[in-house]
Amino acid sequence: MVVALVVSFGYVALGVVSVTGAVRVLTRDPTAAELRRAADVEVARRWESWPSGRIFPERLTYRPGDGEEYEYATRSGIAPETACEASLEPKAAEVLLRHGCRAVLRATYADQLEGVVVTVGVVVFPDQHAAYRARGALSSSPTVLRASAFPGTPAALFNDAARQRGSAERGGPYLVLTTAGQSDGRPAAAVTKGRPQDLFGFVPQLGHTIAQTLATRSLPDCGDRDWEC
């Protein structure tokens, strides 16, 4: 009986210690490392959790040249399809799928003068390491991303044959691609060498803005109702 009582008291003491430890873990503030991990998870989910209009704002600012005033690129539309194969050239799709491409979100913008149109594509990867490796394996050719036209807008005539300039930039678990051409739909092969060199100078700026917006971490705030700690 004495042995049984000792064992019973031991189990009770162990249970009290376990419960006390669990309460401390559940009620303590999160560590800095835990906050960073939660922020990374939130960034990786933005392509699904954010409204499309937040990923692709109606207007994006850019500077057409050094010292010039800022202008606005206006969104013509957001493409409904998100499959990697449908949004990328076959060779590019093969490369990015190999690195874990999950989806490609696309929208097309027209510059303020409506002479240049730009399709911006957000390629989604499982994490930033996969996106980094994909960026290293992919060229920034203007023919990587498929053009997306929208009837009744300045981008109505923009098709794959009209692609003349492109860019690529990684932001967190995303790879943001751009492809641009002239709004009259003229084929790239028909463009003369007399084309102004800075005609497409603003194109990477649009991709950069979207990449930075998607990748900027927002550390959890336990006092904010949008977060649960």
Image (cartoon, helix red, strand yellow):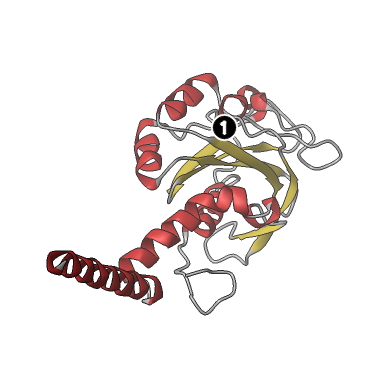
Q: Which residue bears the numbered disc 1?
A: 145
| Residue 132 placement: quadrant | top left
Residue 81 lies, in percent from the top left, at 68, 33
At horizontal 52% and vertical 61% (from top left) the residue drawn is: 66
At horizontal 63% and vertical 34% (from top left) the residue drawn is: 82
At horizontal 58% and vertical 48% (from top left) the residue drawn is: 47
Of residues 219 and 118, the one drawn nearer to the viewer in this rendering: 219
| Residue 179 sits above or below residue 217 on the image | above
Is 66 displayed left or right of 163 in the figure?
A: left
Q: Residues within 10 Å of mark 1 (few under 14, many from 20)?
A: many
Residue 22 lies, in percent from the top left, at 34, 69
* Amino acid type assigned to the residue bearing label 1 in the image: Leu
At horizontal 46% and vertical 22% (from top left) the residue drawn is: 94
Is 115 displayed left or right of 49 in the figure?
A: right
Residue 75 lies, in percent from the top left, at 73, 50
Camera sees residue 202: no
